[in-house]
Amino acid sequence: MMRVSRRQPGFIAAILHRLSGLALAIFLPVHFLTLATALRGADALDAFLAVAAHPAVKASELALIIAMAVHLTLGLRVLAIEFLDFREKTLAALSACCAIALCVGLAFLISAG
């Protein structure tokens, strides 16, 4: 049996993929709450959106966008490992995934600003 070190890039990628998936799963109830608020009428939605304009909420939106990008790119990395001969370039793939995720987050920050 192979012993996996916590310092290996594959282990770090797996942890990041799971944590970003967990962040997205936590976001879903909030998203459904927003949709339910919209069904209660325009006044209820306006009140909810006023709370959503808070800077802490904006920062959490940025974190959510980055989590989505991390989850997507690391999921593509898993698919590449499964279906392509890609096992030797794990550190390069992890670096590319993180760079893409940060670029997506920065693009969101620039477009929202």
Image: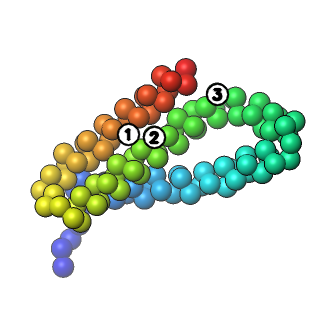
Q: Quickly name the residue at label 1.
A: 101
Against 108, is 19 above or below?
A: below
User: Label 1: how many residues lie within 10 Å, few (<14), some (14-19) or many (20+)?
Assistant: many
Separation of marks 2 and 3 at Cα, in angstroms: 17 Å
**Image mark for residue 32:** none
Cα gap from disc 1 to disc 3, whole angstroms:
21 Å
The label nearer to you, 2 versus 3, is: 2
Is 51 drawn above or below residue 68 in the view shown? above
Q: Quadrant of the N terminus?
A: bottom left
Q: Earlier in the sequence, mark 2 or mark 3?
A: 3
Q: In the figure, is residue 19 to the left or right of 59?
A: left
Q: Quadrant of residue 75?
A: bottom left
Residue 78 placement, left or right of 113 = left
Image marks 1 and 3: residues in contact by CB distance under 8 Å: no
Dot 3 corresponds to which residue?
Answer: 55
Q: Amino acid at mark 1?
A: Ala
